[in-house]
Amino acid sequence: MADLICAALTGCLSAAMYLYVFFTARGKGPILSNTYLFASKQERERLDRKAEYRLVTIVFSLLATVFASLTVFILTKHGIFLFLALALIVCVVIYAIRETAKTLESEKKER
């Protein structure tokens, strides 16, 4: 029973993230990136919104896939889905750090 509850929870998180990605891929909705959230109003006006939407779309789609693979792992107990989830987490972290560094570097050049 606990497995089904965990599977339902991870499945719902995955579906919610895919729904968010559906809108951010079209340049709509809130931008949930640290660069954008912690920027002042003046900095937000100077930020490249298209690049921020792209960053958020990729990161959240990978995270949604992580939760989807965890859901399948919980239901089937096939270890390959757990390894897939771990590999995707590593990819998300590397991509987010790389893109954040690029954004900060471009901001330094503008100043």
Image (tube, helix red, strand yellow):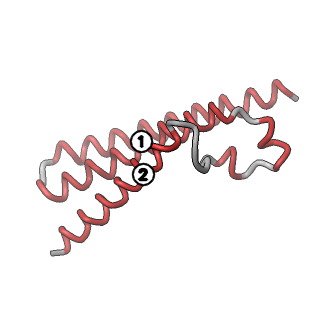
- What x and y, as percent, mark residue 71? 24, 55
On screen, residue 52 above or below 67: above
Q: Position of residue 60 (x, y in %)?
A: 46, 45
Q: Is residue 94 above or below residue 6?
A: above
Residue that protrudes farthest toward the right in the picture: 111
Could you say which is closer to the camera, residue 13 or residue 6? 13
| Residue 8: image location, x then y, percent | 25, 65
Residue where numbered disc 1 is placed: 61
Image quarter hosting the N terminus: bottom left
Please name the amino acid that badge 2 sits on.
Answer: Met
Which quarter of the image is occupied by the C terminus?
A: top right
Write down the quadrant of residue 51 in the picture: top right
Give the residue drawn at x 63%, y 32%: 50
Direction from residue 90 to residue 30 in the image, left or right: right
Place of residue 20 in the rendered image (x, y in percent of width and height, measured from the top left): 47, 49
Q: Are marks 2 and 1 in contact (CB under 8 Å)?
A: yes
- Horizontal side of 29 relative to 14 (left or right) equals right
Between 26 and 94, the residue placed more toward the observer is 26
What residue is rendered at 51% in x and 34% in y?
Answer: 95
Residue bearing mark 2 = 17
Seen in the image, is 89 located left or right of residue 99?
left
Drawn side of residue 3 relative to residue 87, left or right: left
